[in-house]
Image (cartoon, helix red, strand yellow):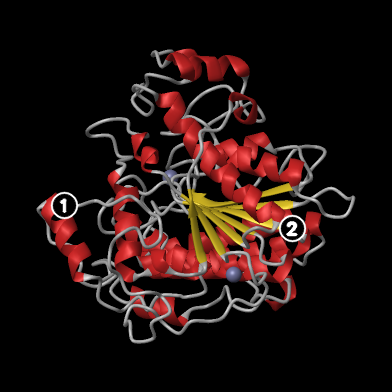
């Protein structure tokens, strides 16, 4: 397979531009409304060296997922969009990384030797040559696009190689060495000019795993609201993120945790997101949104037990984008994250994310580019879906559900959301699926009960 990772638009290959209305993969294009005439709508940071973040054969975080995403985006024509600027991903300096991480940990990563004190050389985070450069480049990419958004050079910024949300200030964790997301948020706090007052940043994390590292970094900082929608910590790494974790004493209500039960479906995942996230974002009124789009919540992902579809991921990406326009003048930094269904999920979710950012949402029912499908099948020796997504076997109506259900739709504040009655008294005789759905309703009520009063929202 020719995995072409030179992401520069027009880099010597023939693709259909996203402005071509005859191209079937491009749905109705909505013109940007608040991008400046000269600035690109989206800045994407990419360098092939980002593929060097590689824990080795057999590790779930395979770099191929990034290369395949770019190939798919290119095959659909997104990389040739005049609204997209692709820039190199620089290696962040130690000083930039030290905005979040301790100097002794950074020194340990430079050494690239197993050291359990720093979470290095573990099963999750084995050491590999040049690991500092690889991880620091992830940080550099996120800071690069955050800077572009902060300065107004681009309206939206994107780093699919980022979203390393588990990394802690003093140690690596959960496949994450440096926390590019936290560094990018810190950089925005330092650089965003909002007329003399303190900037406010909303971090929205939809990875299947709790965004613990970013939450830790800003636990007691009222300038940052961290929101995490995840499988509950009783059943999934890293074990944290209950609804009762609401932020430190100086920032109550600044940490929002939505902890969902195993087997949560797309429908309920969307319901949970829509019942809480737009309301708390509206109450916080951020200046910029940083979002982490880990897609390991998908039903085919091997590392979680959620059953969220590509359609639902796309719907939430569109909603986050809408929130950025509603509250932040469009300022939005979108990052990658987890996602270990490397061939049949990750490229689809992140390509559709890029399409959302470009205001050219994909028609998810369209066929995938034949060349991309062929390339993936050549690499994997497996058949891949010929459609962007087929319904998962255990959720035969997922496509219809995630198309119709739009509880994340127009938000006028908390009162606009349908009330979600607590169901702690689960009626007898429910099916297993109904019990899961009832548990999701409880989880929603739990988060609303812990957070909404602190934000003066109705609960
Ligand atoms: Zn994850
Ligand atoms: Zn936009």
Quarter where residue 355 is shown: bottom left
Residue 89: horizontal and vertical position, in percent? 48, 42
Query: Taking 320 as reference, is 384 left or right?
Result: left
Q: Secondary structure at mark 1?
A: loop
Q: Quadrant of residue 394?
A: bottom left
Mark drawn on residue 286: 2
Rendered location of residue 273, percent (x, y): 56, 64
Can residue 283 be spotted in the picture?
yes
| Image: 53 above or below 420 | above
- Is ligand 1 within 8 Å of the beta carbon of the residue shown at mark 1? no
| Beta carbon at label 2 within 8 Å of ligand 2 | no
Closer to the camera in the image, 137 or 11: 11
Q: Label 1: which residue?
A: 1
Few, some or many residues within 10 Å of mark 2 (<14, 14–19, 20+)? many
Q: Considering only vertical position in the picture, is 109 above or below 178? A: above
Furthest toward the front, the residue is 12
* Figure disc tally: 2
| Secondary structure under the numbered disc 2 in the rendered image | loop
Question: Which quarter is ligand 1 in?
Answer: top left
The image quarter containing residue 32 is bottom right
Front tag of 2 and 1: 1
In the rendered structure, the answer to whether residue 339 lies left or right of residue 189 reads: left
Q: Residues within 10 Å of mark 1 (few under 14, many from 20)?
A: few
Q: Position of residue 65 (x, y in %)?
A: 31, 49
Residue drawn at 48 percent across, 26 percent down: 172
What residue is rendered at 67% in x and 30% in y? 99
Query: What residue is drawn where x is 83% and y is 54%?
Result: 194
Comes first in the chain, label 2 or label 1: 1
Residue drawn at (9%, 53%), measured in percent from left and top?
Answer: 381
Residue placed most toward the observer, 410 or 355: 355
Residue 459 placement (x, y as % from top left): 73, 65
């Amino acid at each position: 397979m020719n995995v072409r990772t030179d992401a520069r638009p027009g880099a010597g290959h023939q693709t259909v531009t996203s402005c071509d209305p005859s191209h079937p993969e491009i749905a109705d294009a909505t013109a940007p409304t608040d991008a400046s005439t000269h600035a690109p709508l989206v800045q994407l940071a990419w360098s092939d060296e980002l593929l060097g973040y590689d824990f080795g054969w057999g590790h779930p975080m395979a770099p191929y997922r990034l290369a395949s995403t770019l190939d798919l985006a290119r095959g659909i024509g997104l990389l040739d969009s005049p609204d997209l600027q692709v820039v190199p991903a620089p290696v962040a300096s130690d000083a930039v990384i030290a905005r979040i991480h301790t100097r002794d940990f950074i020194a340990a990563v430079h050494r690239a030797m197993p050291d359990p004190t720093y979470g290095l050389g573990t099963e999750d985070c084995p050491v590999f040559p040049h690991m500092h450069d690889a991880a620091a480049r992830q940080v550099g990419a996120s800071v690069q696009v955050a800077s572009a958004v902060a300065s107004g050079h681009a309206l939206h910024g994107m780093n699919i190689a980022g979203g390393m949300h588990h990394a802690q200030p003093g140690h690596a964790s959960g496949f994450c060495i440096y926390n590019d997301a936290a560094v990018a948020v810190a950089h925005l706090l330092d650089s965003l000019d909002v007329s003399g007052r303190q900037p406010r940043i909303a971090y929205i994390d939809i990875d299947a795993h709790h965004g613990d590292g970013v939450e830790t970094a800003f636990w007691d900082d009222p300038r940052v609201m961290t929101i995490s929608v995840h499988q509950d910590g009783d059943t999934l790494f890293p074990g944290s993120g209950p609804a009762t974790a609401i932020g430190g004493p100086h920032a109550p209500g600044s940490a929002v945790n939505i902890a969902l039960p195993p087997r949560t479906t797309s429908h309920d995942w969307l319901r949970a997101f829509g019942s809480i996230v737009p309301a708390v974002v509206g109450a916080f009124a951020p200046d910029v949104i940083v979002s982490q789009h880990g897609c390991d919540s998908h039903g085919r992902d091997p590392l979680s037990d959620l059953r969220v579809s590509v359609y639902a991921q796309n719907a939430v990406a569109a909603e986050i984008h809408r929130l950025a326009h509603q509250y932040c003048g469009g300022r939005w930094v979108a990052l990658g994250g987890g996602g270990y269904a490397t061939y049949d999920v990750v490229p689809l979710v992140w390509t559709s994310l890029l399409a959302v950012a470009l205001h050219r949402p994909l028609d998810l029912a369209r066929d995938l580019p034949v060349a991309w499908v062929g390339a993936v099948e050549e690499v994997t020796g497996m058949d891949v879906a010929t459609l962007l997504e087929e319904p998962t076997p255990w959720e035969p109506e997922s496509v219809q559900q995630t198309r119709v259900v739009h509880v994340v739709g127009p938000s006028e504040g908390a009162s606009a959301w349908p009330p979600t009655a607590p169901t702690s008294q689960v009626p007898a005789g429910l099916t297993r699926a109904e019990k899961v759905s009832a548990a999701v309703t409880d989880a929603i009520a739990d988060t609303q009960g812990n957070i909404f009063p602190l934000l003066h929202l109705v609960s």
